Image (cartoon, rainbow, N blue to C red):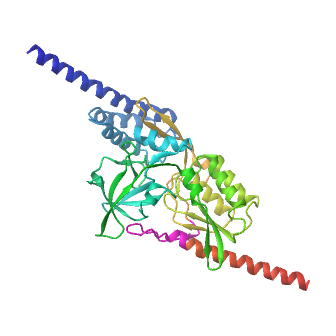
Amino acid sequence: MRLIAICLSLVLSVSAFAEKPRIKTFDEAWKTTKANFYDKKQVGETWDALKDKYRPLAKEAKTETELIEITNRMLGELKASHLVLMSKDAYQEHMLPELGSEPRPQLGFEAIEIDGGIFVRSLLEGGPAVKAGIKRGDRIVKIEGVAAKKSGRLEDEGCDPGLPWPPLYYVRLEGTDPVEMTVESEKGKPRTVTVTPEAISGVIATQNSVRVIKYHGMKFGYVHTWHFLVSQIFGTVSSAMAKEFSQCDGLLLDVRGRGGSPIVMNAILGLFRTGAWDKPVVLLVDDRSRSAKEIFTWSWMREHLGPAVGRTTEGAVLGSQFFPLGDGSCLLCPVVDGRVYTKGDKLEGKGVTPDHVVDYPLPYANGYDEILEFGKDRLELEVKRVKVRAAIFAVLKLVG
């Protein structure tokens, strides 16, 4: 009996030890939000009441995943962007390397849930998923033999629970072993692919995206800036303009994806404001272009730097900061009202609607990109207009 009592005591001690760090993480996230949230009125008495509502649930959380979900339900009640508790894996293995421009082993795609299915939304150029033949719009049916939605390998990237958008996912690795997946490019026609992880980053994918597109006798430069987090993104764009794109007729500047630093944003804008690029350019955006990318688009359209094509941006425009927590997870918290960057215009919860809105269906798209294709058509028109104006000016000069 004494042995049984000792064992029971040990079990209860282990259980209590496991519970304590979890509730500590909840409390830390709550306190950090209260201390740093940009709108102090929003985290007054209401924030105390939300703690009382969710802390008992957090205390009962059996796993880290449950704890993250409960905490994010609380954070989501503030209805603010850039406010989310990221899991340890999502922060340390997915986000932190990108912040440091450090390539990390990954599969190189992000996915989203639509009508109960998990579909590939975007792929890192030159990444493992592309090499394995996965395309935009493919449905992920199984991951290592487990239904995608039930797989523990499918990890939330750390999307804002306070926004109405479904989360974006990536597939978490277990070591560097290849991952077998069942995918469908066409409904009802599954195939098995094996994706071997490789070290890649948004910076490398941006570099890989640089190419010249031949279109109806013209040459268009194309570059996809995956984010504005680090200066290497600016370096890639400016270098491509001076080298690969020097003989091009126009430029397709793709800013679909997450935001980043206002410094990088303004540096890239400066290339067009100062005339470093003086040929026609079309901007590509979509409904997950966010944060600094939205301020970029707002500035672009306000200054009439070229047509913007795609979808209304996400409406996630608050200046934020990362706060690593004691258990290795991380709280992303908004600390600055985005209106300081937009002369008082409110983009939070609203986004920026481009000049030309394009339908952009995803399921079973088979790699087709309507926004890019519309952008090519629009850029062709802009190039022709420039050539016509140049011809008229030359004639007038001769006549004069």
The residue lying furthest to the left in this view is 1
Quarter of the figure with the C terminus:
bottom right
Q: Is residue 20 visible?
A: yes
Quick one: 109 or 90, which is closer to the camera? 109
The residue lying furthest to the top in this view is 2
Q: Residue 133's spot in the image, x, y percent?
A: 42, 63
User: Is residue 357 inside the magenta stretch?
Assistant: yes
Q: Is 79 on the left or on the right of 247, as rendered?
A: left
The residue lying furthest to the bottom in this view is 399
* In the image, residue 132 above or below residue 162: below
* In the image, residue 373 above or below residue 34: below
Q: Residue 378's spot in the image, x, y percent?
A: 61, 74
User: Which residue is pictured at 49% across the width and 35% down the height?
Assistant: 323
Quick one: 366 or 287, which is closer to the camera? 366
Q: Which quadrant would residue 215 be assigned to in this image? A: bottom right
Q: Residue 185's spot in the image, x, y percent?
A: 36, 68
Looking at the rendering, the stretch of residues picked out in magenta corresponds to 354-373
For the stretch drawn in magenta, what is the main secondary structure?
Answer: loop
Quick one: 192 or 295, which is closer to the camera? 192
User: Is residue 90 inside the magenta stretch?
Assistant: no
User: Which residue is pictured at 65% across the width and 56% down the height?
Assistant: 237
